[in-house]
Amino acid sequence: MSKNNVINRLTSGLQKINKNSIPENVIEIGKNCIIDTVGVTVAGSVTPSAKKIYFSAAETFKSGNCTILGSDKTLNAAGAALTNGAAAHALDFDDNCYAGIVHGSAVVLPTVLALAQESSLNGQELLISFIAGLEIQFGVAKAFSNGIYDRGWWTTSILGVLGSAASASKLLDLDTQATS
């Protein structure tokens, strides 16, 4: 299968995900993943590494309305996503998917949370986009199997960017071409 065909299939699948296509038990799992990820992010926000990332992000990125979890600070979407992502993974208590061995929520939630806040979107849009991004991330992870992890690649970073991009595309309601 060609690269373009794979991208088109992933994009088409992402475009079809909506509140009516997601089973209720998956909605509940998604909500629990968000609750867990917020909890580990708040806990991780006080670690030395997360504090260093925040201070670096505060110098690098613009101010904004996006929450830095575990604090009263805010940054723009990029800075908040970076800072919250680092804090979510700091204690290594974030969730794990064994397809590809990837910590999905710690990467995808900071992205959708920041974009939803920056664009004043609602919680339902955030939840659907979060689930959609994880589905893409885990689907690609399953296709690769654990082979890339076994060869030494850190799959959370490799596959997480795909999940984050998919969730952002969904949340921002990008068309098929822009999503591809």
Image (cartoon, rainbow, N blue to C red):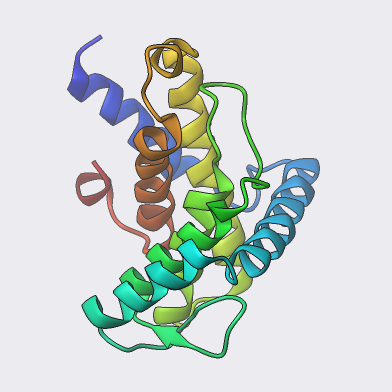
Figure check: 109 above or below 23: below
Q: Please state the horizontal and vertical placement of residue 114, each as a whole percent of the image.
A: 44, 71
| Number of marks present in the image shown | 0
Please state the horizontal and vertical placement of residue 39, each as a whole percent of the image: 71, 63
| Residue at 68% from the left image edge and 66% from the top image edge | 43
With 116 as the anchor, is 26 left or right in this view? Answer: right
Q: Quadrant of the C terminus?
A: top left
Q: Quadrant of residue 148?
A: top left
Quarter containing the N terminus: top left
User: In this rendering, would 78 be left or right of 141?
Assistant: left
Residue at 51% over, 22% down: 100
Asked if one can make out residue 115 in the rendered structure from this viewpoint, the answer is no
* 100 and 83: which is toward the camera: 83
Q: Is residue 101 above or below residue 123?
A: above
Rendering coords of residue 37 (x, y %): 65, 57
Whether residue 31 is visible to the viewer of this picture, yes or no, is: yes
Which of the pair 72/97 is nearer the observer?
A: 72
Query: Does 161 appear above or below 42?
Result: above
| Picture residue at 48% right of the left edge, 12% below the top | 145
Q: Residue furthest front?
A: 48
